[in-house]
Amino acid sequence: MAAKKKRLTVDQEFQIMKLVLDKFLWVGILIMLYGLYMMVNAGQDAVVRGLSYMLAGAAVLVLFMFIIIKEYEIISK
C-alpha cells in the first residue's frame, strides 16, 4: 500500500520559502560585512578589495530579492 503524500497549503509553502531565503540573505549581509571589515582594518591597499566584496554582497542581496519576488508571484497566482 503506497503512502499518500501530504500537500502543503499556500501559507505553509510561503513560510518555508521565507525560512530558506532568509538564510541566503544572511549570506549576502555577511559578505558585505566582511568587505567592510577589510576596508576598515587593512589599510588603503585593501579598500578596493573590500569595496568589491561589498558590491558582491549587494549583488547577492539583489539576486535573492528577485527570487523572492518571483516565487511570491508564482505562489500568489
Image (spheres, helix red, strand yellow):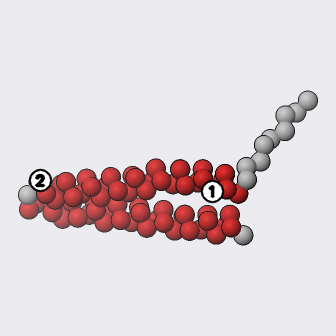
At x 73%, y 49%, the residue is 8
Frontmost of labels 2 and 1 is: 1
Query: From this viewpoint, which residue is outermost toward the left?
Result: 43
Query: From this viewpoint, which residue is outermost toward the top?
Result: 1
Task: Please tell me which of labels 2 and 1 falls first in the chain.
Answer: 1
At x 84%, y 39%, the residue is 4
Q: In which quarter of the image is the C terminus?
A: bottom right
The answer to whether the residue labelled 2 contacts the one labelled 1, judged by CB atoms less than 8 Å apart, is no
Q: Where is residue 19 in the image (x, y as percent from the top left)?
A: 53, 50
34 or 13, which lies in front? 13
Q: Position of residue 9 (x, y in %)?
A: 73, 53
Left or right: 16 with respect to 66?
Answer: right
Q: Which amino acid does label 1 sit on?
A: Phe
Q: Position of residue 23 (x, y in %)?
A: 46, 50
The kind of secondary structure element at disc 1 is helix
52 or 36, which lies in front? 36
Is residue 44 placed above or below 20 in the rendered structure? Answer: below
Q: Distance between the residues labelled 2 and 1?
A: 40 Å
At x 51%, y 54%, the residue is 21
Left or right: 25 with respect to 57?
Answer: right
**What label does residue 41 carry, if any?**
2
The kind of secondary structure element at disc 2 is helix
